[in-house]
Image (cartoon, rainbow, N blue to C red):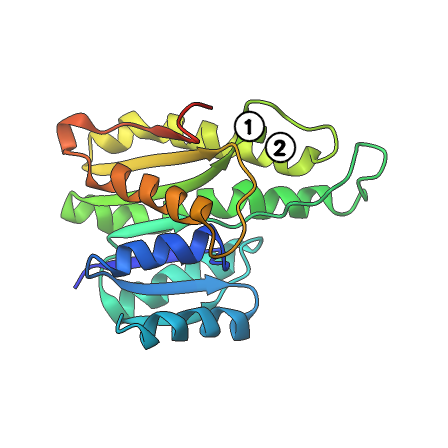
Amino acid sequence: MKTFLSIGAGPGMGFATAERFAKEGFQVVLAARTIAKTRELAERLVSKGYKADGRRVDASDPKSVAELVAEVQKQHGPIDVLHYNAASARKATLSEQPRDSFNSDLAVNIGGALVAAQAVAPKMEDQKSGTILLTGGGFALAPSPDYLSVSIGKAGIRALAHGLFEPFRERGIHVATVTVFAFVSPESKEASSVAEHFWHLYSQPRDSWTVEANYPVSA
């Protein structure tokens, strides 16, 4: 059974994407900072007949991210799909941003994604297959002065995806991002649509891999 690991799994895009892959026969591991909420999401999948469990991870802590990946690999074997969905969406202008919070915001918004990619890449390279999916945002292209730290983080996510796409493709690893130009609430058609975009990217034939999809498509 293939394994899908979601880091930063929440009730919106994270859960919808995990469920989309679970429907295709993946066992799902959901990980986020609050273990009770993560397990609740996993139990929702289990109640529908899917195989899922919840773990705790601090996406801002490189050690926590690396340990999570190692634990999942030890229990389930190589991770076939990594979905990095963590974000610190702090609303703050430059003058409002607490000085001690900016680095921690970036650690969640982009640092954890880089560490997660580092952690899963070796085994993906060994098996010459694997997919790394990153949740992007429209702020990457149209940064908001009211959400500076997440705007910079989403720009970083997009740069990470584009920077890794070619070298990882040569190793059999598909790196891709969905740039989301919409507010997405839990259990919404938007969440399901973003999940479908991620599934489409995963399903692309190897000779037709692309690095980015936009939601909505017209954005």
Q: Position of residue 7 (x, y in %)?
A: 44, 56
Mark 2 Cα-neighbour bin, 10 Å: few <14, some 14–19, many ≥20: many
Q: Is residue 155 left or right of residue 192?
A: right
Q: Are marks 1 and 2 in contact (CB under 8 Å)?
A: yes
In the figure, is residue 127 to the left or right of 85? left
* Most distant residue in the right direction: 95
**Between disc 1 and disc 2, whose residue precedes?**
1
What distance separates the C-alpha of mark 1 from that of mark 2? 6 Å
Q: x, y percentage for residue 93?
A: 79, 34
Q: Secondary structure at mark 1?
A: helix
Callout 2: helix, strand or loop? helix
Location of the N terminus (image quadrant): bottom left
Residue underneath mark 2:
151
Q: Position of residue 114 (x, y in %)?
A: 45, 42
Residues 104 and 45: in front is 45
Disc 1 target residue: 140
- The tag on residue 101 is none
Question: Quick check: 166 left or right of 128?
Answer: right
- Residue at left 67%, top 37%? 149
Q: Residues within 10 Å of mark 1 (few under 14, many from 20)?
A: many
- Name the residue type under label 1: Ala
In the picture shown, does residue 41 fall above or below 113?
A: below
* 31 left or right of 37 in image: left
Depth check, front residue: 10 or 124:
10
Quarter-of-image position of residue 27: bottom left
Please give the name of the residue rendered at 81% of the width and 44% of the height, measured from the top-left corner: 98
Name which residue type carries label 2.
Ser
- Residue situated in front as seen by the camera: 152 or 198: 198
Q: Quadrant of residue 208?
A: top left
Q: Out of 17 and 190, give the one closest to the viewer.
A: 190
